[in-house]
Image (tube, helix red, strand yellow):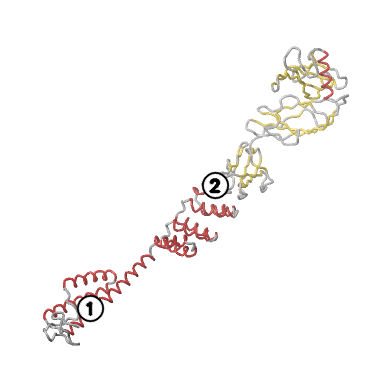
Amino acid sequence: MICPKCGKPLKEGNMLCEYCGEEIRIVPDFVPEIELSIEESINNMVMELNPEIGDGILEETAEIEIIHEAEEEGLLSDSALLNKKLSVFYFIGILILVISLGIGAFIMISHESSASYQTKIGDEKYAEGQIRKAIDYYQKAVDLEPSIIEYRMKLADCYMELDNIDKAIEVYKDMIVYDPTSPLPYAQIIALYEKEGMYDAIDDFLHHNANDEIRASFVNYLADEPQYSMEAGSYDENISITLTNEAAGTIYYTVDGGVPSEDSTIFTEPIVLSKGNHTVKAIFKNEYGVWSSVASKIYDIKSTAPDAPVISLESGAYTEPQVIKVTVPAGCNAYYTVDGTDPDRNSRIYGEPIPLEQGISHYKFATINNQNESSDIVEANYKLEVHTEFTEEVGLIYLYQYLVAKGYIIDLTGASKNYPGNFSYLYGELREIGEIPMYIYKEYYVYGSEARAMTNNIFGVDVNTGDVYLIRRGLNDSFVIAAF
């Protein structure tokens, strides 16, 4: 070591230069103002992080000021002054270390409590394919901010990536708890169930978790009970009931209290209930094969049904042509069937006497009033065996030959010599006119490929002789033979 003033070598341990008398300072002088400024800045920082450490700094700061005062007044020896200053630097070093650790801990705590930071790291792990680690970070973000749907979506995506459907559905259901109005989690859950073909689970999920607005958005996945257009109860007249469902599918029903199934009647048109007590049960099957529960309503109809029609011809066997006449109550129409089904407004309507057909026949008649109320059904069974020498097809040939011979038509195609079209003849019935059993044929004028009109001419062919007659309508639905 050399003297900083004269440059002479110093003996080890000497604090004064033996040549020029200069005092040797191991620790350089401090500018008090700069030292105190540094100390004050450090003190403020540490006080914010930890008040207890700050209190210690205040004490050391006071001690530093005392050292400066003592040094200025020459009250401290050189060795004491050196020790004091070394202790201050030691404390400052320790303080800087503590501050660094505090700042690091503060940053770590800040990250741990930041949902956005956890999500950022989760995104990085997900991009790297570390799905399970990404789940940990996304779960922390969810725990920190449960109401942010985006975090839950990322978490659910991770479970989907791992093919853990149950956990993904669990996350989506948690979303609904925080935002029950958003259709997104519902759509995701439905998509997962649909992928597995679990349509019953979709129906159950929507019924137990969704509000009316959400259910309306996914109505075709639902299987609600059919809705009735009429409330259950007593009515003084026949009623018509319509069954509906907002979803696409099929409604099955019964009117006798039986449990409806796929074997029951499919609802396609209003159900008409007449006098009596009726239990109408209905069930709905949506287009995904999900069944609703059974709906049931009871109706007591107390209306006065119209009188049944009166049939003129008694049931039995006949050997001569017969007609059936029906007496219809006022304000009603009579309807009938010959195929064994019950008559309704879609059946044949009675207008004039009905010629009995050859062979065995079974008729059902009913009257229906303007309120769509139906009478009891009247049934009749007949067997008609009229002796004929030929069939109605042969009778038609006799008719064509007769008209050609008369010059009414040119040939058996019905071509007319007076008109551009043709005449054709259709068999209608077997009827007795003037005590002669006849096949009855109606005449049509045909022009072109589609136009056809019925004329006023009706022809009868004797079933035994083949004679041809021109027939005209008489009084009271009767027929008479006219000149041709």
Judge the density around disc 1: few (<14), some (14-19), many (≥20) Cα neighbours within 10 Å: some
231 relative to 359 in the view: left or right: left
Q: Work out whether residue 38 or residue 444 is closer to the camera in this orientation and state it.
A: 38
Q: Position of residue 343 (x, y in %)?
A: 71, 34
Judge the density around disc 2: few (<14), some (14-19), many (≥20) Cα neighbours within 10 Å: some
Query: In the rendered image, which residue does mark 2 sit on?
Result: 219
412 relative to 19 in the view: left or right: right
- Above or below: residue 297 compared with residue 436: below
146 relative to 24 in the view: left or right: right
In the rendered view of the protein, which quadrant contains the N terminus? bottom left
464 relative to 338 in the view: left or right: right
Mark pair 2, 1: CA separation:
79 Å
Query: In the rendered image, which residue does mark 1 sit on?
Result: 88
If you read the primary sequence from the N terminus, does the residue marked by circle 2 or circle 1 appear first? 1
Residue occupying image coordinates x 52% and y 49%: 215
Numbered-mark total: 2
Q: Position of residue 266 (x, y in %)?
A: 66, 42
The image quadrant of residue 416 is top right
- Above or below: residue 284 compared with residue 115: above
> Looking at the picture, which amino acid does disc 2 mark?
Val
The image quadrant of residue 304 is top right
Marking on residue 275: none
In the rendered view of the protein, which quadrant contains the C terminus? top right
Q: Work out whether residue 432 or residue 127 is closer to the camera in this orientation and state it.
A: 127
Q: Secondary structure at mark 2?
A: helix
Q: Can you name the residue that lies furthest to the front here?
A: 8
> Looking at the picture, which amino acid does disc 1 mark?
Val
Q: Position of residue 336 (x, y in %)?
A: 72, 31
Q: Work out whether residue 120 or residue 267 is closer to the camera in this orientation and state it.
A: 120
Q: Secondary structure at mark 1?
A: helix
Q: Position of residue 475 (x, y in %)?
A: 75, 17
